[in-house]
Image: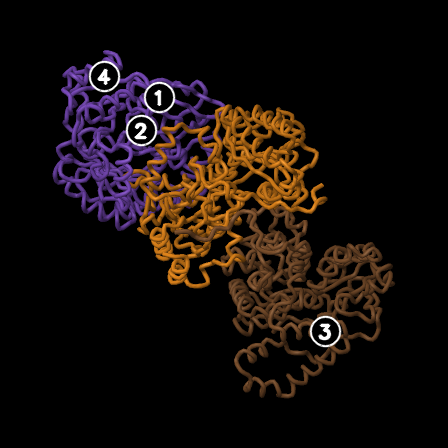
Amino acid sequence: MKLTPDQLAQRLAAELGLDAVSLDADRLATHKIDDKQPVLVCTPGTRDQVSAALRLCADAAASVIPWGGGTAMALGNPPRRVDVVLNTGRLNGVIEHDHANLTVTVESGISLTALQQRLADQRQFGPFDPPFPERSSVGGIVAANLNGPRRGCYGSVRDLVIGIGSLGTLGIITELTLRLVPLPESVSTVVAAGTFSQAEQFIRELFRSRLLPTAVILSNERAHEPWSVAIRSEGFEESVARCRRDLDTLAVQAGMSAQLLSAGEHEELWRAVRDFPLQDKRLIYRITLPRAEICDFLHRAQNWPDTETTTDNVNGTIWLACAPTKASVQRFSDLATLARARRGHAMIFAAPGDLKQGFEVWGDSPPAFSLMRDVKHQFDPRGLLNPGRFVGSL
Amino acid sequence: MNREDLIGELKNIVGDRFVLVEKEDVIVYEQDGSIFQVMPEIVVLPGDVEQVSAVVKLAKQAAVPIVPRGSGTGLAGGAVPAEGGIVLSLARLNRILKIDLENRIAIVEPGVINLDVTKAVAKDGFFYAPDPSSQAACSIGGNVANNSGGPHTLAYGVTTNHVLGVEAVLDDGVIVWLGGEVPDTPGYDLCGVFVGSEGTLGVVTKVAVKLMQTRESVRTLLAIFDEMDNATQTVVDITAAGIIPAALEMMDRTTIEAIERGAPVGFPRDAEAVLIVEIEGLTEHTDRSASLARAICQRNGAREVKLAADEAERQRLWKGRKGAFGAMGTLAPNYYVQDGVVPRSKLPEMMRRIAAISKQFNLRIANVFHAGDGNLHPNILFDMRAPGELDRVIEAGAATLRACIELGGSITGEHGVGLEKKAYIGLLFNEADLEAMARVRRVFDPDNRFNPAKLFPTPASCGEIRLQPAQIPAGLWI
Amino acid sequence: MELLRNKPGDTATTKVPALDLPELYQCVHCGLCLNQCPTYRALHLEPESPRGRIHLVKAAAEGRIELNDRFKEHIYLCLLCRACETACPSGVQYGRIAETAREQLGPPGSPFARAVLNFVFTRLLPYPRRLRFVFNLLRLYQRSGLQRIARSLLPGKLREMDSMLPTVPAKFYYPVTSILPAIGERRAKVAMLNGCVMPLLFGDVNEATVRVLRRNGCDVVLPKNQICCGALNIHNGESAAAKQMAAIVVNSAGCGAAMKEYGYLLRDDLAYRDKAARFSSLVKDTGEYLAGIGLVAGLRPVEMTVTYQDPCHLAHGQRVRAQPRTLLQSIPGLKLVEMDGADRCCGSAGIYNLTHADMSQHLLKEKMQAVTATHVDAVVAPNPGCMLQLRYGTQRFGPDVKIYHLMDLLDRACSETDLTPK
């Protein structure tokens, strides 16, 4: 930085107003990224203020870490430098809800829960399921590409907006237009429990049927058995009822017991699934595979102690939550090798900062990395946006 | 490097028969599905990715523009070599390399015909979702370049939603995979950047696409309207009611006439508009959705709502719809198709504006479009022989695009910008937006050699673009 | 580097008004024909596609390119199968464009080949007696053992051509009487084209056709003095036959397609155009006609699995597809299995298999592969050209299946003797 924090704070305050800048120690402490504390937190209130803030920071050669709801700050490599945290929390308006066209334009800092509440009047919703929706911001969901278990049905973040997954390394999203979906008439969840091989057979047959579940989650808790498969169905009453009937039959054929969840159990289960990838004080692996490879992969990797597994079988994603220890980190190269052999990839999705030092949490370097570096250079030639956190420490 | 050396080298790479230089050969590559013509100097048809790479490298050495071409069915001039040079036809890269039903992935070469992907997996109960009207002829590579849609985009999304990864040859000949066989590959979404880049970033040589499972039940309704306003209002009401059809397509009276003259399928010629509503899913779902949709049609004054009795009848309806563009030849020697988008709720207003534009410029306009997406395809019918008519056509086209933007829409839904609309792209994006795109382009194609003079509103050597021929015998077009 | 640049409006040569057909301007360059064109599918070159050829003809008409050998190659590599017409949403009559271009270019090949073709078309085909004489000679050549000797002596290329020669059957079909009455209740009176080559190579098919028609209540008239497709000579004034006929039936798809075009061909002939149009409206393919009036003869089972090859001039030229299939499926015991690309050309295309042997054999090979995949006993192809080509295909590429005309099988089903293959 070419300026002292105070100097930068004054310049920002002069342009954005006093309430947009904070040097308060407590506030700075709540904006740590991998244990690194910023020197200043800036909370612009408009799109133009974001632009002004970025310009002033660039003039001062200060690095800028975009911060939405702060739920996914454990994602990515430890930042090279943390000067300014740019918190989008005040950019929380709904600009236009065009219900006839099933779209909504929002400012990027609005929390998903707040947005869903606004949309509910028209019986619509944004079909995202990121962890901690009450806190996570729409801009952050997009920047971090946080997909949930229903993406197979409603589309991934990439399908629902434009320009995703750059983890704030190219620019800061200020407004987005999202596609919406009508709220379904009926939702229900069936859980089938049994052995691993029963679950495997059940899922295989489920995918061979014509049913169109919105989500299929295979999970277990720390022990090897039992495994449970949760199947979520949404739609007209009669479609959901049909799914329930067919699922019962499939479960019986696989020798499993199927159970229809109560409304409370349903909420509880999907909250757990949703929040799983960013839970606190665990080391989370994400392995993405062609979906038919999941069971084989788990078969080889499941004998770990103290590990919970939640897999999204529609979309081919495995989440492993392990103890936050060095031993857990050392499994990374095995997992990456197993994933690579199945045309997939593995990454450390979240971990305490100290465990992330010294290696690449994003896993194998992508084949087009030099292009990515050039893209980054075109958009952020001085490397001030979220420096170091993205793939290859971009 | 002189011309002869370049040709000799190209022949060494791909073989003599696949380098075309005679005028009687290259002239047919001067046009695609649009009305623009510029003749290439050389046409090269590589047979594998290594040959593509070698040709691209050679073109860089010789500093010659290189324009990738699939089946040449594009409607915006994307495959027309605006600055001459080499047309790189990918028609021979037409192998389906892998079909993995368990994982619902296929890996295909860019020259594979869109419909052939579905044909290859249909017997196993799968399909490839994006289905442009030209799907019997257009290539997957062309679909990737234009991020093509199709009637079933409404429920299933466009090409980018179905492409997991592409193998591409970059400007220096390097072959690289962007994305892969699984989603969420770490790093910037360069595959997403490539899809829709209209051949300006490199040459796609393999595409990993998603396959979808055929739905248990399909219901297809044909609703016939005597008033255009009622038909457009029906579209608004159907989606507002929370029904998401797999497809929601509209054809107006002029389009119906074209279809019925060319390859008749039995659309009523006296109707002002027909609407095809298709619903897919579990039987329980399609039954209820179809009856809801029928009720909405009737409430909006549909003269008749017919349910396709069987697959043959359904296919007939679609044959009419998908042949609509080609059938324009039965009404006029030339047509200029627009590809604007408006928010669905603005459809009634937009159709009124198009009618007004038609009147103002004294040009017949046939409308056939993806109503559910608000993706319009006004076809301005004209006759190049009539003095001054082309100028009016271009003005009328610009007027429709301006109307789209005024109503909160866009100038291209799925056909791409190409040569056709690059002059209008400034209406949609501001300078900063365009600069952001140009930055991406600079990364991939610093010498501006891949499909130059496209997409971006740079002035090209426009004087050399020839619009379709002029000498037409009178009296054929009644 | 500076490359040659074609300037807009370049006129390299003189315009050719004769090529400036209205049909050209009905093509909007959409490309839906490409993937249906056998030569494009084989080569993936735009100049070998319908859209490309239309573009070339248009360019030649405008004087942008010359009518040179290169141009001619593109025009003559076309099979004239007209599959593109079926695919065209604008209804462009490509066949007319290609035929006009060929008229303008003259026949293909060397001067010698051209002289031979000219002889065949003008001196042989129109004269049944001369034709019969030639086939008698050919039969003699094949049966006397001369062919066997010749094959051992001929150089490769000629030997291959010799192997494509169809075997001339022992019997020709020229019935003595020209009116063959209906068997059972009389429902209609039809004229039938005996044809030029059909009675010589496929006399049995013509015989079968007559039997099937008669058993289904038709008086069959075989007019005397027929010549090549013009048999029912419309230039002979108001054809006596045509006047009272319910239909003029033809069991050769190529001839049927041509005869349905008489109205168009003579459109400028003030004296004959109305008659020609009326004549054309009466022409029906035999299968088309029979499916239309419905079979009344009792049908015996024919235990056989077959696939159906759409002759181009029937499916694309006459848009007759469903009727022959309906007739086949009405035969008890017969199972119809569709093959991939049933309406794709087998590569016969008149004399194309001789003028463009490589492409023809390529297409035939693919066709035989499609047949193999269906595991059938026989292929049904109601057109002599296709039958000859497919028979040759079974010898050269396999599978070992029979090739039948639709009328062969209908005749079996209608007649009393059980002819199920052993």
Q: Is residue C150 or residue C175 the one in the foreground?
A: C150
Q: Chain of mark 1?
A: A
For marks 1 and 2 on the same chain, the one whose residue lies earlier in the sequence: 1
Q: CA distance from mark 2 to mark 4?
A: 27 Å
> Which quadrant of the structure image shows residue A373?
top left
Q: Position of residue B113 (x, y in %)?
A: 48, 51
Q: Nearer the viewer, mark 4 or mark 1?
A: 4
Residue at position x 77%, y 64% in the image: C213
Numbered disc 4: secondary structure = helix
What residue would you read off at disc 1?
Answer: A107
Q: Which mark is residue A12?
A: 4
Task: Give the chain letter for brown.
Answer: C
What amino acid is labelled 3 in the image?
Answer: Gly
Mark 2 or mark 4: which is in front? 4
Which residue is at the front of the view, B55 or C191?
B55
Residue A334 coordinates in the image, percent (x, y):
19, 47
Residue sitting nearer the eye, B51 or A344: B51
Give the Cα distance between marks 3 and 2.
78 Å
Viewer-proximal residue among A315 and C330 = A315
- Label 3 belongs to which residue? C203
Q: CA distance from mark 4 to mark 1?
A: 21 Å
Label located before the other in sequence (4 or 1): 4
Do labels 1 and 2 touch, CB within 8 Å? no
Label 2 element class? helix
Sequence-wise first label, 2 or 4:
4
Count of number-bearing discs: 4
